[in-house]
Image: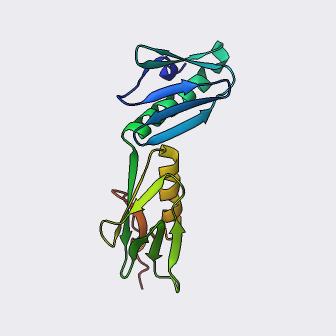
Amino acid sequence: MSRVAKKPIPLPKGVEFSQDASSFLVKGPKGSLSLIKPAGVDVVVESGELRVAPANDDLIAMAGTVRAILANMATGVSDGYSRKLELVGVGYRASVAGRDLNLSLGFSHPVVFSAPEGITIETPTQTEILIRGADKQAVGQVAAKIRAFRPPEPYKGKGVRYSGEKIVMKEAKKA
């Protein structure tokens, strides 16, 4: 049986937690995030920590999931999350204009991606993309969508890849 749900969640300084009958709300310096309250899971605040408790032993898995999501929310509104992408290939470039990310990825047309609410996109260099936000799931989803425009190909390694991602290269055809 999982013991994730039994571990308390420490609330960082400046982070407030509140709940009502249908949702949890976590507020902090980087924004506020909410979660729809699942049935059978209770959260208690005691001495600056959150404790998640299932209504019965059958719901321990759901309690562990809620605990992990609330811990990510607390970290997100206090520190935030970021994901870095790299462009590999001749002529592959990225630039930001307002909330739009303009990508030149070897297509006949530029690819324009609009950042969703709560996500900021920066380009420190023409071949790096930095995605920041308070919601861990949203940051990862935006990074995956941008990577899906031109995933790394296995012969030359060209494409959009996560920073530090290793691409397994295939050997070229021999004559």
Q: State the residue at coordinates (36%, 81%).
A: 90
Q: Is residue 70 above or below residue 31?
A: above
Q: Is residue 75 above or below residue 161?
A: above
Q: State the residue at coordinates (37%, 31%).
A: 14
Q: State the residue at coordinates (48%, 36%).
A: 73
Measured as percent of width and height from the top left, residue 128 is found at 34, 66
Left or right: 105, with 25 as reference point: left
Left or right: 145, with 79 as reference point: right
Measured as percent of width and height from the top left, residue 134 is found at 45, 44
Q: Is residue 2 above or below residue 85?
A: above
The answer to whether any part of residue 145 appears in the image is yes
Measured as percent of width and height from the top left, residue 106 is found at 46, 82
Q: Is residue 20 above or below residue 151?
A: above
Residues 143 and 31: in front is 31
Q: Quadrant of the N terminus?
A: top right
Q: How is the image coloured?
A: rainbow
Q: Quadrant of the C terminus?
A: bottom left
Residues 92 and 32: in front is 32
Q: State the residue at coordinates (49%, 44%).
A: 135
The answer to whether any part of residue 158 appears in the image is no
